[in-house]
Amino acid sequence: MVNCCGLVSEKNEPVPLKSISVQLQVRDHGVSVSSSLQYVNEEDRALEAVFVFPLPADAAVCHFSARIEEQEIVAELRDKQSARDQYDDAVSSGQQAFLLEESDESSDVFKLSVGCLSPGQNAVINIVYVMELSIQADHALRFCLPAVLNPRYTPTASAAGVPEVSSASVIPYTLSLSVDVRSSDRISRLESSCPLDPLVFLDAHHTHATVSLSAGHRFDKDVELLLYYENTHQPSAVVEAGVATAQPGSLMGDPVLMISLYPEFPADVMSSLASQGEFVFVVDRSGSMDCRMHNGKDAQMRIESARDTLLLLLKSLPMGCYFNIYGFGSHFESFFPQSVVYSEDTMEEALKRVKNMQADMGGTEILQALKHIYSQSCYPDHPRQLFIFTDGEVWNTKEVLDLVKSNVYSHRCFSFGIGEGASTALITGMAREGSGHAQFITGTDRMQPKVMQSLRFALQPAVDNISVDWTVPEGVTVDMLSPPISALFQGQRALIYAQLKGQSSGKTDGAVTVKYRLKDQPVTNQLQFTLKPTEDTGRTIHRLAARCVLRCLEQEERAGGADTQALRSRILELSVSAGVSSVHTAFIAVNTHSKQTVTGPLLQRRVPVRRIARSAMFGGPMMMCAMQAPQMACRSIPKKKMAVPEMGFLKGKRRRASPEMLCDSMPMFPEMGFLKEPAPQADPLLQLVSLQKASGHWELNTALADVFGKTEDELANHRPAQVDGSVWATVLALIWLHTCRSEDQVEWQFVAMKASAWIRSQKPEGLSQCVCDGNLLLGGHVTEDALGI
């Protein structure tokens, strides 16, 4: 085994990637990300570096350039196959060339090829992309710079003839990151999973600020930034002027409007959550779920966290609903042949099986499980709610998303990305196409609070008959660029992009009205805005709008039909005119200024990153698997005319390794020297929840007393004489939750609601005395109103 770090050759020669520098320009809800990657060829022969890395799924890559010594080379966006051919021709003839392309299978995987770096030569690669910032449960705007790209499992994974090498856990390159925030709203604070320098405000109104990652940061985990505005949930509208050199009437030539809406739901409708539904929980049980949630001390295994979460979910479901649980890996299985009615018996049977769930089902293939679920008939008056838990290591992301979209009218899909490196394309895509909500559990995040927030969304009444109407001055028309809104949730943002055509007759004000029905009640939300373009926005909104249109066209093309060629032409035209990458285009740059050509065989290098411990994806023993932001193992690449069978040379062209092939060929090594750690103590909250009955009550017994730190006799001796033992036990459980775990209320809120409803249904006497005695026993000060009884 080669035991050195970074990108290495057969002689353990060093990595070409030396540093990564990232600058963020945040403007309200959008961000422009500029990344500079510095390469140095320290070998004695010419080098080709291949760099596979993740980007957020909804990012719009809009610039790619390279600086060789003092020469700046700006890439052009072209048809992907044409760009590949040009790159191959340039590299094979000894010219320096650079190629940036999106994966055919997943929109969050890119491959960068740096061709013909001469010995000792320095190259700086610049990549710019724009994206929307997602909204979190606490109203923060979230940005994540992925540090790892999980190997995408494929049933027929091929090493593509690449010799495998290992890397040490030390990252051989550094990361620097700076953030510039400008907002129409006051900036409250900015937090991160990594150490930051102090936030510096540059104006008296606190609408402009800068911050940087602390010096010396090693890019060994995702860099997560959380930005808090004072009024994040305030609806807003931003108009961006068209590009002066673009054709009027085109997307880039006209002004584009970005609307950020937060629909208001009537309080009387939201006061009661749904008590019906079919809840289907789909859990990844592939080998990769045997990784830890994070690298910190006492981190749970992913599958353990999933088991705890299923316990909470099962205890939180309303009586009389339907439910089922699926596990998937290389195959899938379900707890029940079809969804069953939620009762004490079915809940207990499911919990027994949940306790025995392991990450023992091989690779990550979710498609067949979803097909089976969708083939099952839905229950009338019980809307289907799909909850999917996965670390996102699938290879056929776009096929999965197309399947979810084709079944959108039969269900809502809530997806959860577990651990660093989960595919943003898969997780956000399933929620978007399934009219649901996506959550990512990274770093030290706990899964349970995020999942319970999504359960609240799932229990909200479904919104239907959504329409968007525009009021604009005479002479102006509005073309919607976003797909129709298919889902609205209380407290969640809806983004709309629109193209403004024509000229105003003089007025500069407009309005957008969103109408929908909620439990047969009509609701109207309206936002006023100005048509005057906002200054200093560059082309960010235009590019985000173009990305939105491109994704819709790509999905329409994959669906097939007579107009496939016409759709491809539209994708190419829009991608090139907007300068935004697509599945059919790639950035290509060739250094035509260099008078030096490279001769002799060309070495290809791939950049590895840290490794994390995981079980073998294929059901074997514990293994070490390379995880990467930039990633690679070593191989030699011959020149064009030297045919080598492994690389499939054909007619003088090199067969290109796809981003998937590079991901799937990640080296895996037996893990050694791990000692068995003592099992962590059970969480008292989960212990309490596990004792609750499906109807919502608890029974008076020793196990319940243990949670409270009491004996069963103590509980029995303090029980008011006129109160039933189960009522007394349930009141005590509610008091304990409010007193000892009030900070975790989002996790137990539905458990408590069921308990309160059960107590009310019993109509017990002496309830006030019961609450008083319970507070005295447990040291609480909780009122009957607070308990909801």
Image: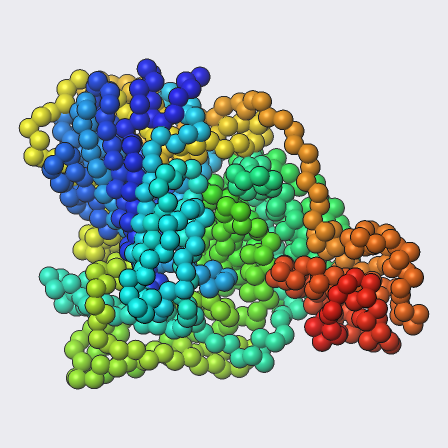
Seen at 46% across and 51% down, the residue is 427
Seen at 39% across and 80% down, the residue is 526
| Relative horizontal placement of residue 592, taking residue 776 as reference (left or right) | left
Q: Position of residue 502 (x, y in %)?
A: 17, 75
**In the image, is residue 277 above or below residue 32?**
below
| Relative horizontal placement of residue 235, taking residue 456 as reference (left or right) | left
Q: Position of residue 693 (x, y in %)?
A: 78, 59
Seen at 41% across and 29% down, the residue is 170
Q: Position of residue 304 (x, y in %)?
A: 63, 43
**In the image, is residue 406 above or below residue 233?**
above
Quadrant position of residue 92: top left
Quadrant position of residue 454: bottom right
Colour treatment of the image: rainbow
Quadrant containing the N terminus in the rendered view: top left
Across the whole image, how many numbered discs are drawn on residues? 0
Q: Is residue 512 visible?
A: yes
| Relative horizontal placement of residue 581, taking residue 712 as reference (left or right) | left
Q: Position of residue 56 (x, y in %)?
A: 37, 49
Seen at 40% across and 44% down, the residue is 146
Task: Looking at the picture, tell me which residue is in the foreground, 196 or 440.
Answer: 196
Quadrant position of residue 105: top left
